[in-house]
Amino acid sequence: GEDVEQSLFLSVREGDSSVINCTYTDSSSTYLYWYKQEPGAGLQLLTYIFSNMDMKQDQRLTVLLNKKDKHLSLRIADTQTGDSAIYFCAEISNTGKLIFGQGTTLQVKP
Amino acid sequence: DSGVTQTPKHLITATGQRVTLRCSPRSGDLSVYWYQQSLDQGLQFLIQYYNGEERAKGNILERFSAQQFPDLHSELNLSSLELGDSALYFCASSVDPQTGSSTDTQYFGPGTRLTVL
């Protein structure tokens, strides 16, 4: 079946690195995505990774993909208070719909 | 700003009523998706349109319907509203779905917050 799992909460100190983890079930997903949702706002696309890649780096963001274990992670370096938000991992099904995890609330303490 | 627009931003209505949510996709995007975000169900896919035709259906109630017009904007119609329909409704668009390429990437609008009293 189609399922995406994330831990619900992560708390870090400003300046530390944050690592948000996600597991998915559909091995045929071509792309995997990370979206960010700030309070009262919509979903902002942060980054995505093609399924045949292991890693993608984009400024402070690093995405790691372990296709064998169906595990995806998002690392935010030098986490800032402005990074406080809910982060959603999503896989794309073969029908084109996105299947989202429950979202991880990142709390950044000053 | 993703380039996807949704109106209205907020909608408050009563049970039993009918509402229409509107979405304009990014310029050049042919596919529109509707998602519902609620506290108990999380983010759930409702329905997808591609170039005016329904492409895929998800957990969409029979009381809900959608369409995509020739100018590619889309409307989601919710009728016989119940308290449980209160949620944030997102529209997303992509260039061309199911190509297995980055053109599948979906960009989301700001959402319409529906409150049913």
Image: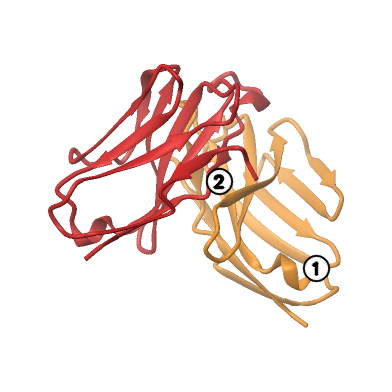
Which residue is located at x 85 percent, y 73 percent?
A: A15
Alpha carbon distance from label 2 to label 1 = 25 Å
Q: Is residue A1 above or below residue A23?
A: above
Q: Nearer the viewer, residue A36 or B19?
A: B19
Is residue B42 shown to the viewer in this render?
A: no
Chain with orange colouring = A
Image disc number at residue B50: none
Label 2: how many residues lie within 10 Å, few (<14), some (14-19) or many (20+)?
A: many
Left or right: B46 as drawn, with respect to A8: left
Residue A56, x across and y down, in percent? 81, 42
Residue A18 left/right relative to A92 = right
Q: What residue type is disc 1 on?
A: Thr
Residue where numbered disc 1 is placed: A79
How many numbered markers are drawn? 2
What is the x, y in percent for residue B67?
Answer: 32, 27
Circle 1 sits in a helix, a strand or a loop, which is it? loop
Across and down, in percent, residue A7 comes to 57, 65
Residue at figure coordinates x 76%, y 48% from the top left: A63
How far across and down, in percent of the image, does residue A81 sit? 75, 73
Q: Which residue is tagged 2?
A: A24
- Look at 18% across and 52% down and name the residue there: B81
